[in-house]
Image (tube, coloured by chain):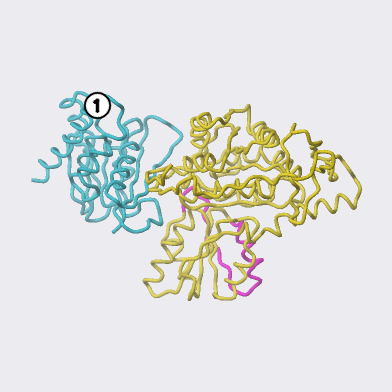
Chain colours: A cyan, B yellow
């Protein structure tokens, strides 16, 4: 089965890195994967997205078209990139940033991702890793073991513990919300 | 080194393939969406004793590649549309002087500055005819990250073997996407070196070819007499206007590529065995076509795909055979009509040739190709 994830936010939030880590986790799980991104002329600011397609079969078309899980960290990203979400797909939004939601039959998870990174972990920059934790927890995209290893393999030396805590915080947020 | 599995970007795969092929010189000028190739080679080349240089522009970069190659080093440059236009003059020089090198063009929307960050397939005819004068051309068009790696190695092998520039053409999506890739152990990859003369320096003629039309090559400064010019030249490399010599040289240059056509030709067929309609598509578009063919089959439409991996020389024989088999060929490409003229020529009216074209800066979606297939069924 083809599983499509789109991670969106604004430039500089580490959305593309999150996509890369998710893709590497899928490889650790032994799956096929393709990661693409929208690539604008600006390097910071503006809506940005990373897409990850995970499948056990060969992946022909590399871009997302019928999204199973969409994550939006900003209102602009949500407005711009939520159009291709499947009718019964899942949408994770940052509860402080995204207030206006598009219509649709998706399952919504409004979670304080950015606040958790800032307040609980004391580092706003790990919001993308908290977001990854929520994605891994709320989907069958990747295993927890794979995502942990993939995060550790990508983050700078000395930040391993912080990032693992961020990932765990994402799992917690998702757990609390789905109960 | 063992085979490795991991997530890799298309442009990164190109750089890695170049290293495996023995490339030890890169000259370039950064341009989106090709810059990661330069970035990666700036990191990798010094590790293997190679040289990286950022030149003042794309013209200089192409010139530097030719110079390095004459100096005996496998050389490469990479660019996108605007830079590819600038390289054309020196590209012709490399063809005429028979200097092997690899030129990568990661295609973006054009003409002019166009769409720097969006994919296109609109330089395929420029690759064939961009430089002036009558000349043969070899161009490869990979459709996956793994294939970018392998085609880069192939491009070097063909360039060295046939003493001619080889163009590697792929679009922004292939260049920037990351894919799960399993690379073979580099020690298992066949690497071709340029043909060397067996004669002593006194009798060496730099442009005298043997039976296969490829003249042996010596490194500049190796003790062999050697003159290089963009003027029409004789077997010694000196300018000539002797009609007989000029004509013979021109014909040999063309024959050199034509006679090795089977060695160059590469393509993939998908579900073509019993197909009644077919798609002809390359690069990113071929991936959409493959998905469209799968869906068409599930809906009872006997569709198939011919995916050229070598674009030039054109796959006349293969397309001709296809035209005999199917009733219609849909040529899907991200331009407003380029390779379709070659398909029409090779089909010789034996099958209907229909176009699906897109020039919006977005890849063609499988559904679009599916609809085109349903229309010609």
Q: Position of residue B331 (x, y in %)?
A: 55, 63
Q: Chain of mark 1?
A: A
Identify the residue at the far left of this view.
A179
**Against A165, is B181 above or below?**
below
Q: Quadrant of the N terminus of chain A?
A: bottom left
Q: Position of residue B105 (x, y in %)?
A: 58, 43
Residue B105 placement, left or right of B274: right
Residue B23 placement, left or right of A58: right
- Residue B346: name its quadrant: bottom right
Q: Which residue is mark 1?
A: A124
Q: Please state the extent of the stretch shown in magenta in the rendering.
A: B337-363
Q: Residue at x 24, y 56 (%)?
A: A87
Residues B255 and B201: in front is B201
Q: Position of residue B23 (x, y in %)?
A: 58, 38
Identify the residue at the far right of this view.
B242
**Against B253, is B87 above or below?**
above
Q: Residue at x 76, y 56 (%)?
A: B211
Q: Is residue B354 found inside the magenta-colored segment of the image?
A: yes
**Against B27, is B158 above or below?**
below
Residues B253 and B134: in front is B253
């Amino acid at each position: 089965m083809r599983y499509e994830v789109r991670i969106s936010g604004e430039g500089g939030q580490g959305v593309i890195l999150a996509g890369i880590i998710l893709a590497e986790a899928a490889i650790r799980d032994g799956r096929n994967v393709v990661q693409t991104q929208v690539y604008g002329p600006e390097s910071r600011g503006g809506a940005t997205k990373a897409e990850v397609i995970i499948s056990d079969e060969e992946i022909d078309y590399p871009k997302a078209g019928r999204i199973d899980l969409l994550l939006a960290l900003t209102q602009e990203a949500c407005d711009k990139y939520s159009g291709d979400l499947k009718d019964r797909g899942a949408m994770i939004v940052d509860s402080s940033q995204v207030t206006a939601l598009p219509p649709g039959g998706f399952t919504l998870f409004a979670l304080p991702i950015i606040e958790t990174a800032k307040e609980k972990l004391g580092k706003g920059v790990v919001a993308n890793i908290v977001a990854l934790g929520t994605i891994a927890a709320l989907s069958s995209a990747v295993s927890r073991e794979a995502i942990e290893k993939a995060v550790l393999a990508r983050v700078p030396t000395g930040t391993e513990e912080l990032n693992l805590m961020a990932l765990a915080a994402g799992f917690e947020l998702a757990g609390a919300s789905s109960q | 080194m063992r085979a490795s599995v991991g997530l890799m970007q298309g442009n990164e795969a190109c750089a890695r393939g170049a290293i495996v092929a023995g490339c030890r010189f890169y000259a370039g000028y950064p341009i989106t969406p090709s810059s990661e190739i330069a970035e990666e080679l700036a990191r990798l080349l010094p590790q293997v004793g190679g040289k990286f240089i950022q030149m003042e522009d794309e013209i200089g970069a192409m010139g530097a590649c030719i110079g390095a190659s004459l100096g005996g080093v496998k050389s490469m440059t990479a660019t996108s549309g605007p830079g590819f236009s600038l390289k054309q003059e020196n590209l012709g020089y490399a063809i005429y002087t028979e200097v092997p090198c690899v030129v990568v063009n990661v295609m973006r929307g054009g003409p002019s500055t166009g769409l720097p960050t969006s994919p296109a397939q609109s330089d395929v005819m420029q690759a064939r005819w961009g430089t002036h004068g009558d000349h043969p051309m070899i161009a490869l068009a990979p459709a996956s990250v793994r294939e970018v790696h392998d085609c880069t190695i192939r491009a070097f092998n063909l360039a060295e073997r046939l003493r001619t520039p080889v163009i590697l053409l792929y679009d922004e999506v292939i260049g920037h996407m990351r894919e799960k890739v399993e690379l073979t152990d580099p020690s298992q990859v066949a690497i071709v070196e340029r043909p060397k003369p067996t004669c002593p320096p006194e009798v060496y003629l730099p442009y005298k070819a043997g039976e296969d039309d490829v003249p042996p090559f010596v490194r500049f400064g190796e003790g062999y007499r050697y003159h290089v010019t963009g003027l029409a030249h004789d077997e010694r490399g000196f300018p000539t206007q002797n009609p007989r010599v000029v004509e013979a040289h021109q014909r040999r240059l063309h024959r050199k590529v034509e006679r090795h056509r089977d060695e160059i030709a590469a393509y993939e067929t998908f579900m073509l065995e019993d197909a009644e309609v077919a798609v002809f598509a390359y690069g990113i578009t071929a991936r959409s076509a493959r998905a469209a063919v799968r869906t068409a089959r599930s809906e009872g439409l006997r569709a198939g795909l011919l995916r050229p991996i070598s674009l030039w020389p054109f796959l006349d024989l293969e397309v001709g055979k296809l035209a005999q088999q199917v009733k219609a060929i849909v040529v899907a490409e991200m331009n407003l009509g380029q390779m379709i003229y070659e398909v029409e020529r090779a089909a010789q009216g034996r099958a209907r040739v229909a176009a699906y074209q897109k020039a919006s800066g977005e890849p063609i979606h499988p559904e679009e190709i599916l609809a085109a297939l349903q229309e010609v069924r």
